[in-house]
């Protein structure tokens, strides 16, 4: 089948903010539903695999490795395979990634698969994930454009991600009361296949963004270009560093509940509070704030979002701690405006690799944050550790916010409409690239 050229269409500027225009784009609806199914499959498979490994070995260490093994392959895949996102047609990459995950789930579900193979298959899924996510993120700029609709589309996918964690763990637990762990893995096989089918039939085929060369060299070259640009590097760090610190309370939820002398029921509440705040913050910023307002809140929220954690050492009571976590989570709304700055700063031919590096770095640095928080809690009280995280994290984030402001002034593009040829077209009605072939009035893993 020959490659199709990117189509162009003339679209009016959105007159109001909100998520409605994003769902008006047919291709985005397919990507949105595929993302929900694929992510649900990942979450349920992690739960089922953890239980399965524990049943087979009786080892808490090997069972915990199911989660821990997700971080290193994520970094390796995001670094060495990032070039896949630009070198191959994006729809093909997304479908193949889902099929690889489906194949891994099928092998995991086989009764004859040994524990070592189960862990290897878990690593394969983890290595594929950043390529899938980075390609999907870059694809959104083709589907929705580089402007405000892209920002809202990214926000919706993040909301799905947070919701999938809340729903997926509960659904996985219920599913395991009905079927065996291998049976649950067979269910996740279906979610991956459904995601692949949606992407294959619901999105258009587009050409690759860039040319050839050795894949690893091409991937590493892209990573060097991304990290070598001062503006892009500053934006990436501001996307990475706040999450590295904000995961500490979640990582230490069980230890904090023990320190506070409360029952295990509180652990679930402590772990759910921050995702609830994140979802609420994203929804409010996306639905109620204009693009200019979302741009204005980036640096204040990024710099001060960890301040609520300073209440931890004062032991205010668990009700107040839940509110603290909701507030810290809601500060994640800064990413809506920052996403816009990031996509404006990255050249189109580098976009797939940049998005993959961003995804891999985010997952890796959160893993590092969890590990460091756990190590610190071996020495100091959990409340002291979380309070210290609030102080140290705020200092780091304020310094990064200052660097982002400086680089924005040098380029003259911080908080402004993107340069002509990118997001400005989406908001001024010029001809823009679009991946949606449906007849609609709005356009922009």
Image: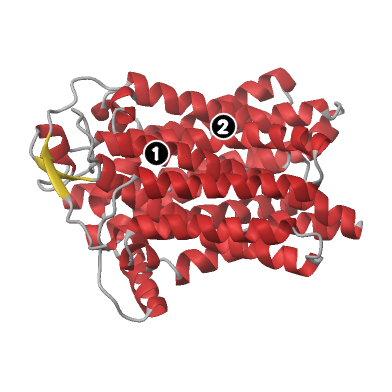
Question: Which residue in the protein does label 1 denote?
Answer: 30
**In front: 441, or 193?**
193
Along the viewing direction, whichever of 42 and 240 lies nearer the viewer:
42
Q: Residue at x 66, y 50 (%)?
A: 370
Mark 1 or 2: in front is 1
Viewer can see residue 393: yes
Task: Assess whether mark 2 and mark 1 are in contact (beta carbons under 8 angstroms).
Answer: no
User: Seen in the image, is 312 located left or right of residue 308?
Assistant: right
- At numbered mark 2, what does the secondary structure look like: helix, strand or loop? helix
**Which residue is found at the position 11% from the left and 48% from the top?**
421
Q: With 403 as the anchor, is 37 left or right in this view? A: right
Residue linked to disc 2: 163
Q: Position of residue 154 (x, y in %)?
A: 38, 39
Is residue 58 shown left or right of residue 414? right
As drawn, the residue found furthest toward the right would be 58
Which residue is situated farthest in the front direction here?
Answer: 1
Quarter holding the N terminus? Answer: bottom left
Q: CA distance from mark 1 to mark 2?
A: 18 Å
Which of the marked residues, 1 or 2, is nearer the chain's N terminus? 1
Callout 1: SS: helix
């Amino acid at each position: 089948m020959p490659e199709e050229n990117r189509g162009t269409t003339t679209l009016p500027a959105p007159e109001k903010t909100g998520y409605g225009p994003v769902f008006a784009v047919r291709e985005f609806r397919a990507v949105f539903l595929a993302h929900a199914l694929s992510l649900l499959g990942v979450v349920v498979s992690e739960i089922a695999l953890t239980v399965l490994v524990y049943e087979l070995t009786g080892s808490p260490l090997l069972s915990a490795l199911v989660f821990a093994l997700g971080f290193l392959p994520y970094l390796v895949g995001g670094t060495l395979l990032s070039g896949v996102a630009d070198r191959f047609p994006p729809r093909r990459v997304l479908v193949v990634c889902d099929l690889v995950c489906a194949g891994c789930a099928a092998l995991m579900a086989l009764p004859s698969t040994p524990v070592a193979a189960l862990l290897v298959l878990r690593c394969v899924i983890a290595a594929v994930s950043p390529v899938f996510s980075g390609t999907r993120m870059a694809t959104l700029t083709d589907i929705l454009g580089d402007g405000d609709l892209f920002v809202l589309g990214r926000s919706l996918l993040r909301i799905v991600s947070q919701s999938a964690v809340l729903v997926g763990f509960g659904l996985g637990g219920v599913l395991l009361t009905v079927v065996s762990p291998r049976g649950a893995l067979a269910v996740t096989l279906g979610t991956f296949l459904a995601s692949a089918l949606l992407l294959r039939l619901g999105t258009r085929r587009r050409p690759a963004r860039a040319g050839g060369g050795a894949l690893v060299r091409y991937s590493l070259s892209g990573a060097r270009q991304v990290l070598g640009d001062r503006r892009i590097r500053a934006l990436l760090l501001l996307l990475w560093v706040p999450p590295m610190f904000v995961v500490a309370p979640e990582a230490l939820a069980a230890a904090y509940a023990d320190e506070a002398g409360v029952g295990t029921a509180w652990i679930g509440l402590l772990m759910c509070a921050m995702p609830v705040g994140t979802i609420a913050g994203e929804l409010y910023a996306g639905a109620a704030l204009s693009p200019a307002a979302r741009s204005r809140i980036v640096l204040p929220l990024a710099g001060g979002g960890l301040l609520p954690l300073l209440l931890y050492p004062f032991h205010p009571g668990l009700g107040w701690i839940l509110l603290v976590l909701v507030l810290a989570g809601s500060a994640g709304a800064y990413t809506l405006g920052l996403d816009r700055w990031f996509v404006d700063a990255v050249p189109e031919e580098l976009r797939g690799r940049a998005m993959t590096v961003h995804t891999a770095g985010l997952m890796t640095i959160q893993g590092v944050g969890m590990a460091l928080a756990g190590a610190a809690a071996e020495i100091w009280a959990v409340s002291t550790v979380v309070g210290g995280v609030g102080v140290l994290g705020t200092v780091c984030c304020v310094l990064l916010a200052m660097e982002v402001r400086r680089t924005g002034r040098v380029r003259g593009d911080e908080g402004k409409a993107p340069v002509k040829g990118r997001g400005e077209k989406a908001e001024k009605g010029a001809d823009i690239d679009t991946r949606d072939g449906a007849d609609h009035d709005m356009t922009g893993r």
